[in-house]
Amino acid sequence: MRIISIDPGFERVGVAIIEKSLLKKDILVYSDCFKTSTKIPFCERLTKIGTEVEKIIKKYKPSALAIEKLYFTTNQKTALGVSEARGTIIYVASKNNLAVYEYTPPQIKVAVAGYGRANKQMIMFMVPKLIDIKKNINSDDELDAIAIGLTCLACENIH
């Protein structure tokens, strides 16, 4: 079982491909954080996000998408942009026949750290204990994508 998990954004998008292992820790096949330029129109940024996600789906052939739900935010402009990026990502996943699973930040924190108000340091501490990572994780968005994927594999009966 292989999933793509995404921490959505319109400036930075964290992505991970995780493979379920029944014998040992789950395996991180791929992870990254890609960025879109603030110098291009927003609709072009959404197109870039969709194109990049589709390339990753075609290359790694996951059967499901795990994505963070927009929980709440004080900045409505940012929330709207992230919502549009989420819509683009979900559209691409659906177009490629992937099942879609969505999780709120507290659900992710409970699944990874056992506590719904866990801070970033707790998540950073727990993620490497739950999955085999053979590279340096360079951004919070990439780490969050891995945590989202771990949540999906822990919560769903995916084969």
Image (cartoon, helix red, strand yellow):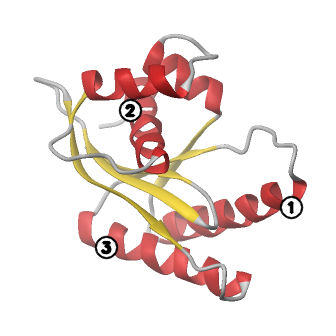
Which secondary structure, mark 2?
Answer: helix
Tag 3–tag 1 contact (CB < 8 Å)? no
Tag 3–tag 2 contact (CB < 8 Å)? no
- Check disc 1: other Cα within 10 Å, few if <14, some if 14-19, many if 20+: few
Which residue, given by chain and number where applicable, does mark 2 sit on? 150
- Check disc 2: other Cα within 10 Å, few if <14, some if 14-19, many if 20+: many
Name the kind of residue labelled 1 in the image: Lys
Q: Position of residue 150 (x, y in %)?
A: 38, 32
Which secondary structure, mark 1?
Answer: helix
Which residue, given by chain and number where applicable, does mark 1 sit on? 77
Name the kind of residue labelled 3 in the image: Lys
* Quadrant position of residue 127: top left
Query: Which of the marked residues, 3 or 2, is nearer the chain's N terminus?
Result: 3
Q: Is residue 128 above or below residue 144?
A: above
* C-alpha distance separating marks 3 and 2: 21 Å
The residue under the point 68% across, 64% down is: 87
* C-alpha distance separating marks 3 and 1: 32 Å
The residue under the point 59% across, 24% down is: 107
* Quadrant position of residue 71: top right
Query: Which of the marked residues, 3 or 1, is nearer the chain's N terminus?
Result: 3
The residue under the point 54% across, 23% down is: 109
Q: Position of residue 76 (x, y in %)?
A: 89, 54
Lateral position of residue 83 relative to residue 88, left or right? right
* C-alpha distance separating marks 2 and 1: 29 Å
Q: Which mark is residue 58?
A: 3
